[in-house]
Amino acid sequence: MNFSTKINEIGRLIDNYFTLPGDKPEALATRKNFFFFLVRGIPLVATLGIVFFFQGCIHLATAFWIFTVSELFILLIFMLKRKHTILFVLINQYFYILFSFVAVVYFGGILYSGGTVFIGLAGALVSLSFLSPNQIKYLFIIYICSIIIEAFLQPLLVPVPELTPGLNLLLFVLHLLVISFSLYITLRTYLQQSLKAKKMEAEHLKELDKIKTKFYTNITHEFRTPLTVILGLTNPSLKMNSTKLKKNISLIRRNGNRLLQLVNQMLDLSKLEAKAMQVSYIQSDICPFIHSLIEPFTHLANKKNIRFQFSTEQKELNMDFDPEKMESIVSNLLSNAIRYTPQGGSINFSVSVQSPEHPENTYGYSPLPVREYNSSQLLSIRIKDSGPGIEKSEIPKIFERFYQVESDTASRNEGSGLGLLLVKEMVNLLHGNIFISSTPGKGTEMKVLLPISNKAKKTEFEEEFTMQGEGEEVKNLNKTKVRNDKELPVLLIIEDNHDVAAYIKMVTDKKYELLSSENGIKGIEIAQENIPDIIISDILMPGINGYEVCATLKNDFRTSHIPIVLLTARTDKESQITGYEKGADAYVTKPFDPRELLVRLEKLIEMRENLKTKYKTLSLVPEPDMEESRDPEEIFLLKTKEILNRYYSEDSFNAEALSQQLGISRSQLFRKLKALTGLSASRFINFYRLSVAKQKVLKSNLNISEIAYEVGFNDPAYFSRLFTKEFGSAPTLFRLNTSDNTSDHS
């Protein structure tokens, strides 16, 4: 082990020894600095005592040894009681001033004590690195008072004979060097701390700015989503009759309530932080009230295929509670749990009564101090989910303003970021406590404890709440409507917000056959299976986000041709650029005009129709290099042409055989070719055979029957009918007319 390694090992041991539970980095740094300050000075002072002893200066040596022993004693006590660093700093610096005063008086005053007065100044200066301004002020006041007293006592003091003028000068220079060194150390420490503080402040401001930007982006998304539904359903261009409008009143009202809830959350938080929020207790049975609060969330959980379990041992519990505060606490905690719990997961919600004697440190981390409850019973509300969990280092931060956990599911879990902060402040206002324990990959448990009392006026609580679940009109709109009267373009809607999905379905219902998915993973599966004509996808969704959906479908030859419209509340250019980089064909921001959405969809389908002629004629042009082509549609058609080129002469080669060669289902092949060329798979195979036959009619001397057999038709008459339909004349006349035209040209 080399020298630097040993030094590093010693440094780690010192860090471990001085690190205490719950320490901040600043506390550890202060503790270590004071330790090194004492350790550096003690050997030097002890050595000087020995030197002066051998020089016969017994009084001087004794003074140095008294100072050494006193410093050693302070150091040893500090090592044992290292938590109270500032107290030991104060004791040490006051000792410097006291020792300086006694030594000056003993050795004959300021002029004859060899600059011992500087020891007190050194103590006062060193305090600048450790103490608060108020503590430093009193230190300097006492030091200055000691100098004034020494000056008044100077005529009465007698110099010690062993302190000769030469030794007095030497000690003066020595003490001046000590004070200079102390001043240097103090200034260096101050500058280092100042630079470090500025750097930390800059980093903090940068991080705060980043978090604020994310917060405002997320809160904008939270506002834009309900606004999309409200503004959309009240848009005059929809021309809804009174019956249809009446059916959608509950949809508009629910999204209006969501906006109101967001605004109230922000106002409540402002009131809490300004200490302006009042508690309005009522005394009633809290059990039916909690039942009414969780009812909407059971519907929401079922809708997400989450197993929601509620348990309580209390059939009746009369206590004081504030209905608004309790609703805010329970609603935010349950919303959080449902938001982060994946489909197929579980949430356990339980209510019980417990005594305050149970040690709270077994519940997990709490952002609030330990409570001394004035109640013999506590209401315990426990919510446990099977979500992704939270890293231990992030748990203390989730109750901070603007902070949101970074995770694989972050894209779908972006919200206002106020919920847990609001819960913490509400619980604190109610003199309770909140705890969280979490294991990454296993889930999170939140526990709220509130004191039970019966002091408020008794009130009969009326159970009155609005269902937050999905209305019947939304459920009905979720059903895919299959039309048999005429063929409509197939539109796939990938949107996790049921109200927004319902609104899009209402806007597009008459013009498209609708498919829907509430998450990206299922949306990709539906797209690959059904090959829709166009897709609308939200960006922030469960599982994978809209960008990933877009990239996945655009890189799959089965779905690469499908136009994709990304729908989001994000209006910044960076988000739009990211969408286009992933292959999006259009970008629509919430809230949107229904006419704009319909026009975008219509124009994208028109563009796809215009490309059909190009893709259809690929079978007639010379075959380009597939590796040079970057268009996935061209690559697909050229690959199809390559297969047809090998098998077109076999009369048994059909659409089923082609789909097997391409590795996709027959229905997928049908939808893909229909979207690209306007032809079914069977018609596309025949078109290719006829295109080859056309070349043989023009450039070979084979008779028409021979050409028909060569291109895979075992019925020459059927071949002639198809040829005539495709090219406008029978094969024989086509050859004759072409030959005549060539001759006339010559």
Image (cartoon, rainbow, N blue to C red):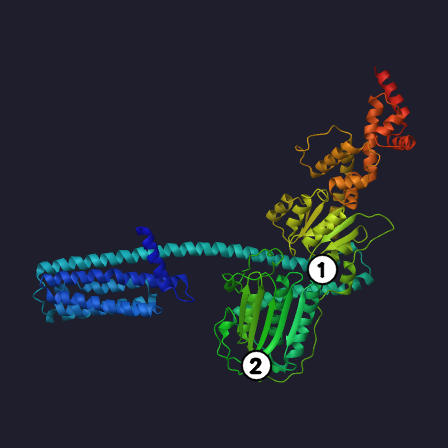
Real-space Cα distance between discs 1 and 2?
39 Å
| Label number found at residue 452 | 2
Label 2 CA crowd tier, 10 Å (few <14, some 14–19, many 20+) = many
| Label number found at residue 612 | none
Determine whether 322 is above or below 64 in the image: below
Q: Residue at x 58, y 64 (%)?
A: 443
Q: Residue at x 87, y 50 (%)?
A: 485
Q: Provide residue 543's location: percent of width, then percent of height.
A: 64, 55
Label 1's element? helix
Q: Provide residue 554's location: percent of width, then percent of height.
A: 68, 44
Amino acid marked by disc 2: Ile
Q: Nearer the viewer, residue 224 or 356?
A: 356
Task: Say which label, 1 or 2, has the lower sequence index.
Answer: 2
Q: Residue at x 51, y 55 (%)?
A: 209
Amino acid marked by disc 1: His
**Quick one: quadrant of the C terminus?**
top right
Tell me the quarter of the picture where residue 304 sits: bottom right
Tell me the quarter of the picture where residue 80 sits: bottom left
Q: Is residue 735 visible?
A: yes
Q: Which residue is mark 1?
A: 498
